[in-house]
Amino acid sequence: MPNPSEAAILPVIDGIYAAACDFAAWPALLERLADLLGARDAAFGTMSPTGIAWLEAPRTDPAFLGRYADYHAEDLVWHAIAASGVGSVVTDEMVGDAADLRIGAYYNEWSLPQGYRTKLGGLVLDEEGWQTMIVLPGNDRYTAAQVQLLKLLSPHLRRAMQIHMRLTESRLDDEVSTRVLDRLASGALLVDGNRRLLFANRAAEALFQPGGGLALSGGQLTATGRTEQAALDAAIARCARQAPADSGADLDLRCEGAPRQLRVIPLRRSVPLVSPGVPVALLIEAADRSDEAVTTRLRLHYGLTPAEAAFAVEIAKGDGKRAAAARRGISYTTARTHLSRVFDKTGVRRQGELVRLILGRDPSDS
């Protein structure tokens, strides 16, 4: 193919930076990139330590794209790109003998039926095992000029991904408010795709105490027990992949005393995850709702006396101060005094807010 002119290259570079701010613009940009480089398609994606985090290939048959993970281990050119280093550009001819590359299910069942006989690609980002790369499958042998053109474009793709990462991190409050999480009565934690702890509210401190079921090792969240650790790894990995139908998982933690359950909730993102360091999962302690457990929690978190905490549990049952006082065997005057002190210590002012607090929700929710 003839070498593209500067007039053809500059709009594509502009499009790269526009896509950095609007991820929905990538499919159209990738098609322009494929045309510029004489490829049949341009695949752009990130591989995390646990699998494909996201992959965009606008001209690849969606049915084939959905099966790519089954063939990924045999994609020798992809693995060569991953090992080449950031900024390097690789073609299939640089990887090995053409006859060797055309043996196996990947080439014959996945690549060849789509007319993908050659490849050109480069590693765009490599952060803590998260690798973002551009791969351009084609039908014809790639030339030295095409290799040089991708080398020219690669730094722009890298900067675009770095801009996207910063924007994604800055949108944390749009996904989940740490201010709200800090007010929950139950333990709440945010982790990234590498299980690194990004946030833990005050109530989560009990989870890290000896016998609490969780621990931190090098900043990474770990569960006590091999089975529990495997379940935690799998749940967070699913959150990182952001499977559309995945609603999370419940984990039973090995801890001293009463069993403890942790709910792993995937954070829904409006843009794909391209690197570690961005929250992928919210872990909420499934609180014990027994009267005894709630009474203990209120005493520990808010400094209520045993009598005040027990009365708060009764008043949360919703049938009024007189009924709660009768169940506790106290006078109505004492009940009013207890309630006033409960309000003062917890910071709420209405019985509805107190009920939400006892249920482990933000008291300000309506």
Image: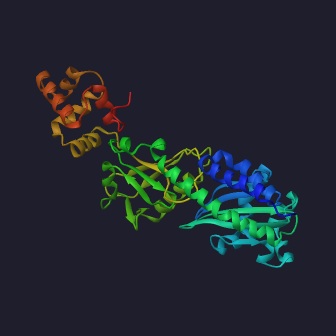
The quarter in which the C terminus is drawn is top left
Looking at the image, which residue is at 61% across and 51% down? Answer: 20
Type of colouring: rainbow
Looking at the image, which residue is at 55% across and 46% down? Answer: 269
Residue 283 lies, with reference to residue 318, above or below; the image says below
**Percent of width and height locating residue 218:** 40, 68
Residue in front for this viewpoint, 348 or 326: 348
Residue in front for this viewpoint, 165 or 276: 165
Residue in front for this viewpoint, 30 or 305: 30
Q: Quadrant of residue 309?
A: top left
The quarter in which the N terminus is drawn is bottom right
Looking at the image, which residue is at 18% across and 25% down? Answer: 325
Residue 89 shows in this picture = yes
Q: Is residue 330 left or right of residue 61?
A: left
Q: Is residue 318 left or right of residue 192?
A: left
**Percent of width and height locating residue 212:** 33, 57
Residue 41 shows in this picture = no
Residue 266 lies, with reference to residue 349, above or below; the image says below
